Image (cartoon, rainbow, N blue to C red):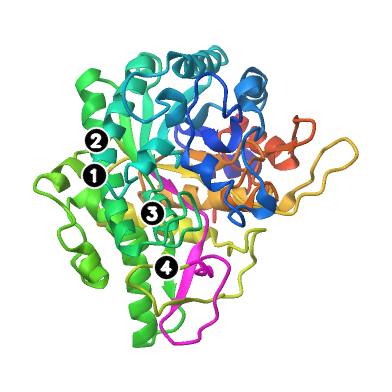
Amino acid sequence: MTTQQTQDQQLRFPEGFAWGAATSAYQIEGAVSEGGRGRSIWDTFARLPGRVVNGENADVAVDHYHRYRDDVRLMARLGLGAYRFSVSWPRVQPDGVGAVNQRGLDFYRRLVDELLGQGIDPWVTLYHWDLPQALEDAGGWPARDTALRFADYAAAVHDALGDRVRNWSTVNEPWCAAFLGYASGEHAPGRREPARAVLAAHHLLLGHGLAMAAMRAQRAGSRIGGCVNLYAVSPLTRSAADLDAARRIDGLQNRLFLDALLRGEYPADVLADLGEAAEGLAETGDMGVISAPMDMLLINYYSRFTVSGAPGGAVSAAAAPTDTGSPWVGSEHVSFAGSGRPVTGMGWEIDHDGLREVLLRVAGDYPRIPLVVSENGAAFDDVADAGGFVRDPERRDYIEAHLRACHAAIGQGAPLVGYFAWSLLDNFEWAWGYGKRFGLVRVDYPTQRRVPKESALWYAETIRRGGLTGPAQ
C-alpha cells in the first residue's frame, strides 16, 4: 500500500455517510406571489424601512421556483448524495391553517421527483423561519396555538411527500427564530419583547414534538429529528465573572434546547437566569412531547463564542447585541470578545475545533443519538473573473478544516452520519440581503447564472473520494 493510499484511508468517512448541501425556501425560491403562496413574516419584515440591508427582499431571490430542474442537475454534476431544503409553510398553507394549497405541494412533489431521478436523497426541513403572516397576526410563536397549527402543517407535508422522503427535520434553529425574531428584532417578525421570546422558544420546541407525533401517526419509516444551532462557548479568562458569562450564554444558546430535546427538562440555572420570563413556561405533558425520542439530531455549526462578564468588554460581530436590542435574555451584562482568530465575511471567528468539541459534547453528555452536521459554511468577499468563476480558497479551507474536525470527532466516538455544506447557492442572507455570499455556487443575481466556485469543485472531488487527503489531525 502506498503512502498516499494510507493517508486516504486515514481520512475516509464511514460507509453510507451523507454528503450534501443545504438551502432554505425563502432564501432561494422567489415566486412569492405565484402558485397560491401566502405572505410570510419575512415578506412583511423585508418591507419595513431599515430592517434589511439596502432594502432588499426575496421576491425573486435566486428564482429556484422556476429553475429547480437546472439546480438539481447542477447538484448531480457536483456529486451531491443528499440535498437539504425547506418547505415554505405559506406556499403550502397560505394562512397557516385550513386546507392545503395543492399547487404549493405540487412544487415540492416535482422537486422531490427530480432529486430522486438524479439519485439525490431529499432531506426536508419543515420550518426555516417563514411563518405565515396570518399566524403572526394571531400572536406568532409566543402563542401556543401556533405550535398546534405547525403540527397540522407538518402532517400535511408528510402525507404528501412521506412516501418518497425518508429524512425530515422539524424546526430549524429555534434559538434564532425565537430570540432574533422576538427579543432583538433583528429577524422577522422584528419584535422586541424578551419575555415573549422565551415563550416562543418553548412553543417552537413544542411544535417540534407535536409535529413529530403527527408524522409518526401517519407512516412508519420516516427518520425525524430536530435541528439546533450550537456554539462552542469559552470564557475570555478564568475569572468568576467570565466563567459565569460562559455558563449563561452556553445555557441560553445550547443547553436550553439540548436539555429539553434530549432530557425532557429545562436547565434549572437557565430558568433562574430567565427569571419571571420562564415562570409557568411548560404546561403539564409538554416536556414529554418535546423530548419524545428522535431518530437523529441535526446540528448547525459556524463559530465559537468567547464571552466576558466584565463591564465594557470588547464586543465581536459574531454575537453582538444590535442597537435594536439583545437576544441574550437573562444575560444582559455579558459581552462577546474577539480571541484573535481569523474571521469570515460575516465577522464570525473561524474555529473548526469548536465543531469537534460540540459533537463530542452532545455525544458524551446526552443520550446517544445519530448526529448530522446540517449546516456549516462561510461567507467571504468573493470576486468573480470575467467568466463568473470564483477562486475561493478561504471557503475551501474552511470546509476542509471542519470536515477534518468531523472526521476527528467520529474517531473519538461521535455518531456522526452526515455533513451538509451551507449553502448550495448564493442567496438572500436574511437581514444582510444579498451582500453576503455563502454559496458553493455563485449566482449572478441580474442574470441568475450559476457558476460553481473553486470550493464546489473541491467539494465534488471530496465527495467522489468519500473523504479527505492528507494525514489525519
Q: Do the residues labelled 2 and 4 touch (CB within 8 Å)?
A: no
2 or 3: tag closer to the N-terminus: 2
- Left of 84 or right of it: where is 138? left
Task: Give how far across and how far down residue 185 sits, in percent.
Answer: 47, 58
Q: Is mark 3 on a helix, strand or loop?
A: helix
- Amino acid under disc 1: Arg
Task: Please tell me the numbered disc located at residue 233.
Answer: 4
* Residue for badge 3: 175
Q: Do the residues labelled 2 and 1 touch (CB within 8 Å)?
A: yes
Q: Where is residue 239 in the image (x, y as percent from the top left)?
A: 38, 87
Q: Residue at position x 39%, y 76% from top? A: 332
The part of the chain drawn in magenta is: 298-324
Residue placed under numbered mark 1 in the picture: 144
Q: Which amino acid does label 4 sit on?
A: Val
Front disc: 4 or 3: 3
Give left or right: position of 215 versus 307. Answer: left
Find residue 143 and report its horizontal and vertical position in percent. 27, 46
The residue closer to the viewer here, 286 or 302, is 286
The residue beneath circle 2 is: 148
Say if mark 2 contacts mark 3, CB within 8 Å. Answer: no
Dot 1 falls on a residue whose secondary structure is helix
Amino acid type indicated by mark 2: Leu
Mark toward the viewer: 1 or 3: 1
Tell me the crowding category of disc 3: few under 14, some 14 to 19, or many 20 or more residues within 10 angstroms, Cα based. Answer: many
| Numbered disc in front, either 2 or 4 | 2
- Please check the rendered image and state whether residue 16 is part of the magenta-colored stretch, yes or no: no
Residue depicted at 20% across the width and 58% down the height: 266
